[in-house]
Image: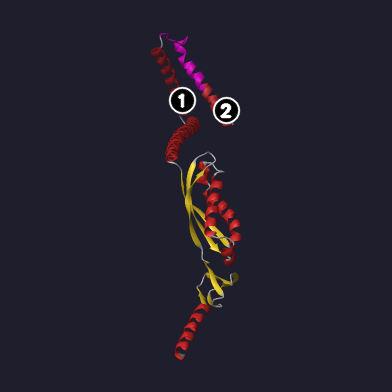
Amino acid sequence: MMLETMVAFLIVAIIFVVKAVKVVPQQHAWVIERLGRFHAVLQPGLNIVIPFIDRLAYRHNLKEIPLDVPSQICITKDNTQLTVDGILYFQVTDPKLASYGSSDYILAITQLAQTTLRSVVGKMELDKTFEERDDINRTVVASLDEAAANWGVKVLRYEIKDLTPPAEILHAMQRQITAEREKRALIAASEGRKQEQINLATGEREAAIQQSQGERQAAINQSEGDKQAAINRAEGEAEAIRLVAHATADAIASVAQTIRQPGGMEAVNLKVAEQYVSAFGNLAKTGNTLILPGDLSNMGSLIASAMSVVKQSQSGNTTS
């Protein structure tokens, strides 16, 4: 009998110890009720409770939890039905409020996410819902976070997974996209042709300018060449005149020097007579009229007159 009592006592002690010792995992929180009322929140690690008086009422996961929000049909501002589904990320921040603030906080935030999403989408036209998904996400998160604070829950993010319009709208949108792309292609082709015409006109204008500049430069070069050629001809003619004048002066000086020598005057008389006779001969050959002196026998007197002129010139040069 004594042995049975000890065994029973040992079993009761083991049960008591098992009920009294609670080991809470990391990132978890357990809510303890004592005699039906909230008593404490057990933190991660080893905790001691009073068996049969304290009761483990709720277990909460403090990690970030993803929650799939079921798809629903929303009506846009332009009366278009749109099937929307998303995913919600939340975290329990207050285990006590999460236990007693709502009978089911997961259901509460799910329903609130759906109603908020319908309200936000109903204020937008269909095209805006695709362009402003980030704004929709932020609006839903702000609304949920404000309400979920009383439930001990922090809503972190909301992301729309799919926006699915009806099949007819999808086909219309596809045709619109096709038409828009064709429009852009036509505009691009038109801009290309316009730019091509501009480039051709610019090239022709630049070519005309270059040709005009080339012709102008050629005319300038031709004028400079003509000018230089005229200068060269004038300088050549001046040089020729100068050389002829020098040669004539040298010849006259040579003739004067020769006249001063013995027999010089006789040579001059002979030369003058020859030129006189030659001149009359040429006149007879080139013309129909023959000019003769009034007295052919007086040719000597003519030659004597010419020689007197030569002598006077010689005497003048000697005097000077």
Of callouts 2 and 1, the N-terminal one: 1
The residue labelled by disc 2 is 316
What is the magenta segment's predominant secondary structure? helix
> Gap in Å between the C-alphas at discs 2 and 1?
17 Å
Image quadrant in which the C terminus is located: top right
Secondary structure type for disc 1: helix
Outermost residue to the front: 1
Q: Position of residue 316 (x, y in %)?
A: 57, 28
Q: Residue furthest bottom?
A: 2
Note whether 71 is above or below 14 in the view shown.
above
Q: Amino acid at mark 1?
A: Val
Q: Position of residue 4 (x, y in %)?
A: 45, 88
Q: Secondary structure at mark 2?
A: helix
Q: Is residue 151 left or right of residue 229?
A: right
Q: Bounds of the magenta span?
A: 288-307
Q: Residues within 10 Å of mark 1 (few under 14, many from 20)?
A: some
Q: Please give the residue where the numbered disc 1 appears in the rendered image.
A: 268
Screen quadrant of the N terminus? bottom left
Above or below: residue 258 compared with residue 46: above
Mark 2 is surrounded, within 10 Å at the Cα level, by few (under 14), some (14 to 19) or many (20 or more) other residues, namely few
7 vs 145, nearest the viewer: 7
Residue 293 drawn in magenta: yes
In magenta segment, residue 294? yes
Residue at left offset 50%, top offset 62%: 65
Who's the residue at 52% across and 55% down the image?
Answer: 110
Residue 93 placement (x, y as % from top left): 57, 65
Is residue 8 visible to the viewer in this orientation of the structure?
yes
The answer to which image quadrant residue 103 occupies is bottom right
Report the amino acid beneath label 2.
Gly
